[in-house]
Image (cartoon, rainbow, N blue to C red):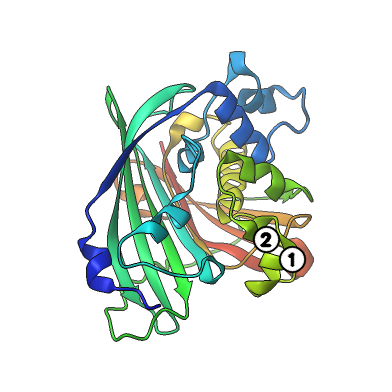
Amino acid sequence: MPIDEAAARAAAPRTREISWTPGDVQLYHLGIGAGVPATDPRELRYTLEKALHVLPSFATVAGGGEPGVIRVLSTPGVEVDLARVLHGGQTLTVHRPLPVRGTATVTDRVTGVYDKGEAALLVLATEAADADGPLWSEEARVFVRGAGGWGGERGPSVRSAPPAGPPARTVERPVREDQALLYRLTGDLNPLHADPAFARAAGFDRPVLHGLCTYGITLKAVVDTLLDGEVSRVRSYGARFASVVYPGETLRVRMWRGGGAGAGRGAGAVQVAVSAVERGDAPVLADVVVEHV
């Protein structure tokens, strides 16, 4: 069934209350590969409650439950087969450091329904606030294969200029064979990431890693490598999911200092490109910018 653009755009915002504990934060960090080596003080910031810091990308799973890429599918006018859904990109702005324990009110609204020809693109914007004010804003870009072609607006381009020159730093991050099985315990139970039969029906050889897991692994690599491990320095983070990652692969994370909108606002920025080493450096995250102080 095609997407009803008018109904989706007219859908009322939806609000819910979420909460999280230090254990939820620790599980998320383990799900993106933190804790290796287990006794390294730099890793204990992510895994030990007495020293716990919250990586800003935890916002994408805070409160558990379905992520934005799934929540948008319950919007009026959107009736699609989950096997045709792909997460196209994610942006996040943090208004202040995330607490290790919290309760927040979260509001979702569809801000865009675009016709990309062979696919439709849905944009879900989310705002989170607690008793002290805004906490974070995020945007999920979701492609539905085979649902385009109705003659609607194509929407703005999110491509950015590629970084120039050699990267300032390059690191590699191995992805565990069971990484997706661990990460899905944060709330994203999409069978694409665990069920081989479902993955084949969706057109993949085997289950793929959650895009938001790659997203978290990448932000942690930037924070640990260029921001002295200081999670509170991150102001915003955006990425386009260029291709899938398979559990067991190795991610190559290249980082360039400079670029991004924040460079003109007294802030710094890091441009990043992420590829899968075993597949000839095939790009998996592109148009990645981390703005920071």
Badge 2: residue crowd in 10 Å (few <14, some 14–19, many ≥20): many
Q: Residue at x 35, y 30 (%)?
A: 104
The three-letter amino acid code for the residue at tag 1 is Arg
Q: Quadrant of the C terminus?
A: top left
Q: Residue at x 58, y 55 (%)?
A: 190
Measured from the top left, where is residue 254 in percent x and y? 62, 55
Left or right of 125, for residue 200:
right
52 and 69: which one is in front? 69
Q: Which residue is mark 2?
A: 208
Q: Quadrant of the N terminus?
A: bottom left
157 and 66: which one is in front? 66
In the depicted structure, whether residue 251 falls above or below residue 182: below
The three-letter amino acid code for the residue at tag 2 is Val
Badge 1: residue crowd in 10 Å (few <14, some 14–19, many ≥20): some
Residue 120 bears which disc, if any?
none
Left or right of 86, for residue 259:
left
Measured from the top left, where is residue 238 in percent x and y? 44, 53
Q: Does residue 32 appear in this view?
A: no
Q: Are marks 1 and 2 in contact (CB under 8 Å)?
A: yes
Q: Which residue is mark 1?
A: 206
Q: Does residue 120 appear in this view?
A: yes
For label 1, the SS is loop
Quadrant of the image occupied by residue 11: bottom left
Q: Residue at x 24, y 64 (%)?
A: 9
For label 2, the SS is loop
Measured from the top left, where is residue 234 in percent x and y? 44, 38
